[in-house]
Image (cartoon, rainbow, N blue to C red):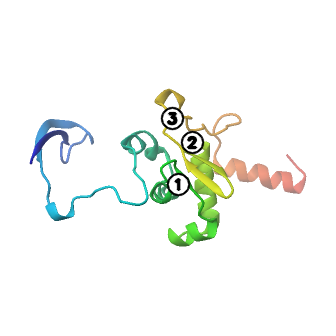
Amino acid sequence: MSRPIYVRREQQGSVNPGAILEDVMIEKRILAADRVRRPPRSGFSWIDRRFLREHAPHLSRDAMLVYFFLTAVSDRDGLSYWRDVSTAAQIKTATGSLVRAREELVGRDLVAFEPPLTQVLSLPERSQAKPEREPTRCGPPRSLGDVLAEIAARRTGGK
């Protein structure tokens, strides 16, 4: 059974990357009928497409990996209780990287964490999504040389 879908094809080699050349209809069909993905009899997980569109572009690689892992191992309520050491070993990263990635997910309101439980949360509505924090600046941009000269002056007691 085929189903038509419409995709936007980008102009190849364009000076303006992302320029839309045309909308194209693709006939969507099952490629391997004997390998159609079905929900498992035990366990429960999925990735909401909104995560990929609205949240993933703002996350670090480690945070995306941790999010995907947590969605794969969580129950129907989004809960999992994997230890940090076990999770880090499973996704082949350092425990510190895992902790920073999880903190990033908590900060973006994508997971809740109270040891030993982690919960993958329903995605916040667009208006509720926490915006990426802007870096704090004190004054106008300065050259690296000026910053280093200021640090050197502070160390020697001068200004």
- The label on residue 108 is 2
Height in image: 134 above or below 47? above
Task: Determine whether label 1 and label 3 are within 8 Å by CB.
Answer: no
- The label on residue 55 is none
Task: Determine whether label 1 and label 2 are within 8 Å by CB.
Answer: yes
Q: In this figure, which residue is indicated by the disc labeled 3? A: 124
**Image point 33% across, 55% down: which residue?**
39
On the picture, is 32 further left or further right than 159?
left
Provide the secondary structure element on which disc 3 rests: loop
Q: In this figure, which residue is indicated by the disc labeled 1? A: 63
Three-letter residue code for mark 2: Arg
Three-letter residue code for mark 1: Ala
User: Is tag 3's residue or tag 2's residue first in the polypeptide sequence?
Assistant: 2
Height in image: 141 above or below 158? above
Distance from Cα at disc 1 to Cα at disc 2 = 10 Å
Please tell me whether mark 1 or mark 3 is closer to you in this view.
3
Where is residue 1 shown, x and y percent of the image?
9, 48
Three-letter residue code for mark 3: Pro
Height in image: 112 above or below 19? below
